[in-house]
Image (cartoon, helix red, strand yellow):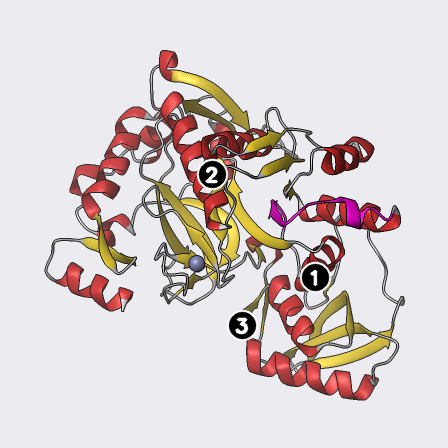
């Protein structure tokens, strides 16, 4: 429906992208997008240089817009420290910064309005998961240069709930405050939420805590981990999405229906592209998320590549709110592998395995050649009570149905595959050796 309406609207040349919200058709006018492009080209030294030789005033349709070059974190690093800034210094009230694990970090300047807009979006996130002004929100993500902690807090205060700004680590204090102050919401990365859940269990505190909901951000996490956190703490979990360059966390979240992550299309324009060719993909197909900001003043971003893999969900959520949705993040483009002409992401493999059952969360992907063709072998650990032959058969079958290629599956006993403290190595591509 949405795509058809959009096509019709483009056909009559008034260039409007359409969403349906609470039964009302919301027209996202092309003029809003054009205004963002022209502003960036005129005021941000980063975009001024990127668009030199391009007449942005001649960008008059979504199609023209789709031909503008992408921007990327690699180029933004070259604009260090403040080459992205699009307003005079006196309007900037704060900066945040990406982690910068390799090379210089990216610095993002914010105006007072950017800070306010972010808080409004974040408060909306809390509302979407049923959190209200009576809730007590324990905030465990970090404060400082990183955007996380302060975003969770600003949204909480905007909503009128009570923030308990503990910050990261200090598990003793976290548990003490959680019990004494009767926190109802925990906000955390998935790994820290799991650690807290295990501690609550170990210390027998479950009957003393009042948590109802968990707002989890910043990492890709599988269903198995989700179930463990949710069961150990008896809470409902919500996925919050965001990245430092685009405000921070809080630009999207799932609702009680958990059909996808709603995103705020009154602030942001989302495209999904083929990460290799850059072509825009139709709604429903998986690719890389590219974001344009409509209202960001300090550091506007146009066609910014997130390197996150997802898809637009081509239906309206049954909650009826009508803000469009993307799927949970499937992984990073850097982790993508191409086998038999099909792009495969680690998140898809994990989804396949959780659909099969009888396996642990550990697996390896081995890619090689056989008779001149790609061959993918999935090595999985089975749980103690599983029949290896039966599991292997189901893995091959589900993989074929979900991802579309024939693979081999090798089952090994639980505990055979290596465990990783930090980043796990699961893919072994031997084709180019
Ligand atoms: Zn919904």
Pick whichever of labels 3 and 1 is earlier in the sequence: 1
Q: Estimate the spatial distance between the alpha carbons at disc 2 and disc 1, rounded to whole Å.
A: 25 Å
Disc 1 is placed on an element classified as helix
Q: Which of 88 and 357 is in front in this view?
A: 357
Q: Nearer the viewer, residue 371 or 349?
A: 349
Whether residue 205 is in magenta: the answer is yes
Taking the spot 64% from the left edge, 35% from the top edge, the residue there is 139
Q: How crowded is mark 2: few (under 14 residues within 10 Å), some or many (20 or more)?
A: many
**Residue at the extreme top of the image, as rendered:** 90
Q: Nearer the viewer, residue 367 or 252?
A: 252
Taking the spot 70% from the left edge, 85% from the top edge, the residue there is 394
The magenta-colored residue range is 204-219
Whether residue 100 is in magenta: the answer is no
Pick whichever of labels 2 and 1 is earlier in the sequence: 2
Residue 46, placed above or below residue 411? above
Where is mark 2, residue-wise?
122
On the image, which quarter does residue 182 sit in?
top right
| Residue 227 disc label | 1
């Amino acid at each position: 429906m949405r795509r058809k309406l959009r096509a019709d609207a483009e056909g009559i040349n008034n260039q409007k992208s359409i969403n349906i919200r609470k039964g009302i058709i919301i027209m996202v006018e092309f003029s809003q997008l054009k205004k963002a492009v022209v502003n960036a080209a005129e005021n941000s030294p980063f975009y001024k240089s990127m668009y030199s030789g391009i007449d942005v005033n001649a960008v008059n349709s979504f199609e023209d817009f789709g031909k503008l070059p992408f921007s990327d974190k690699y180029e933004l690093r070259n604009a260090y420290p403040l080459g992205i800034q699009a307003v005079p210094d006196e309007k900037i009230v704060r900066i945040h910064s990406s982690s910068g694990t390799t090379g210089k970090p990216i610095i993002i300047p914010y105006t007072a309005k950017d800070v306010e807009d972010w808080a409004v979006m974040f408060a909306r996130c809390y509302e979407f998961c049923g959190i209200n002004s009576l809730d007590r929100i324990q905030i465990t993500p970090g404060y400082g240069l990183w955007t996380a902690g302060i975003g969770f807090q600003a949204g909480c205060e905007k909503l009128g709930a009570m923030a308990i700004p503990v910050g990261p680590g200090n598990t003793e204090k976290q548990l003490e405050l959680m019990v004494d102050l009767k926190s109802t919401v925990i906000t955390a990365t998935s790994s820290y939420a799991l650690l807290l859940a295990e501690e609550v269990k170990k210390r027998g505190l479950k009957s003393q805590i009042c948590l109802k909901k968990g707002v989890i951000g910043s990492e890709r996490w599988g269903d198995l981990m989700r179930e463990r956190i949710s069961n150990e703490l008896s809470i409902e979990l919500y996925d919050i999405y965001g990245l430092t360059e685009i405000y921070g966390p809080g630009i999207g979240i799932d609702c009680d229906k958990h059909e996808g992550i709603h995103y705020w299309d009154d602030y942001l324009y989302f495209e999904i592209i083929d990460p290799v060719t850059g072509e825009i993909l139709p709604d429903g197909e998986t690719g890389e998320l590219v974001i344009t900001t409509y209202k960001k003043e300090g550091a506007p971003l146009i066609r910014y590549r997130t390197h996150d893999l997802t898809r637009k969900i081509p239906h309206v959520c049954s909650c009826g709110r009508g803000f469009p949705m993307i799927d949970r993040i499937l992984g990073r483009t850097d982790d993508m592998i191409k086998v038999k002409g099909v792009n495969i992401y680690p998140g898809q493999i994990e989804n396949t395995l959780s659909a099969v059952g009888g396996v642990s969360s550990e697996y390896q992907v081995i890619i090689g050649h056989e008779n001149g063709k790609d061959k993918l072998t999935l090595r999985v650990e089975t749980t103690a009570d599983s029949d290896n032959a039966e599991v292997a058969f189901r893995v091959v079958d589900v993989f074929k149905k979900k991802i579309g290629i024939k693979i081999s599956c090798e089952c090994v006993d639980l505990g055979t595959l290596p465990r990783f403290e930090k980043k796990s190595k699961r893919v072994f591509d031997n084709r180019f050796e």
